């Protein structure tokens, strides 16, 4: 179980929110300040998401060995 990985404390907590935010960035639907915050929040979310995928991969490898 990956209990130490949580999205609860993140501004962007799931893929749906991340997708909507990225769409607004691409379409230019935000001020520079909003863009900077969105960029930071998306990078934080993606870092957490990548960490979760790596941990899942490690657990799968443990199971098949």
Image: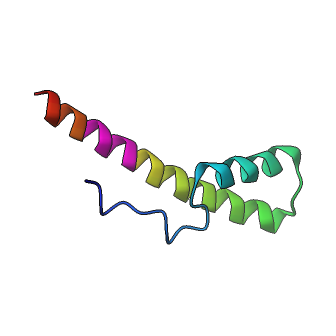
Relative to residue 65, is residue 15 depicted above or below? below
Whether residue 35 appears in magenta in the rendering, the answer is no
**Residue at x 67%, y 55% (from the top left corner):** 17
Residue 31, horizontal then vertical, whole percent: 87, 63
Residue 11, horizontal then vertical, whole percent: 61, 68
**Residue at x 53%, y 59% (from the top left corner):** 44
**Residue at x 62%, y 61% (from the top left corner):** 40
Give 25 or 14, whichever is nearer the viewer. 14
Relative horizontal placement of residue 29, taking residue 47 as reference (left or right): right
Give 52 or 28, whichever is nearer the viewer. 52
Give 52 or 3, whichever is nearer the viewer. 3
What residue span does the magenta drawing correspond to?
52-58
Q: Quadrant of residue 43?
A: bottom right
Relative horizontal placement of residue 61, taking residue 53 as reference (left or right): left
- Quarter of the image containing the C terminus? top left
Relative to residue 12, is residue 24 depicted above or below? above
């Amino acid at each position: 179980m990956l209990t130490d990985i949580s999205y609860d404390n993140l501004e962007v907590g799931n893929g749906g929110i991340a997708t909507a935010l990225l769409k607004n960035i691409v379409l230019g639907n935000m001020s520079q300040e909003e863009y900077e915050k969105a960029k930071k929040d998306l990078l934080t979310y993606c870092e957490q998401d990548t960490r979760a995928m790596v941990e899942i991969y490690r657990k799968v490898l443990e199971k098949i060995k």
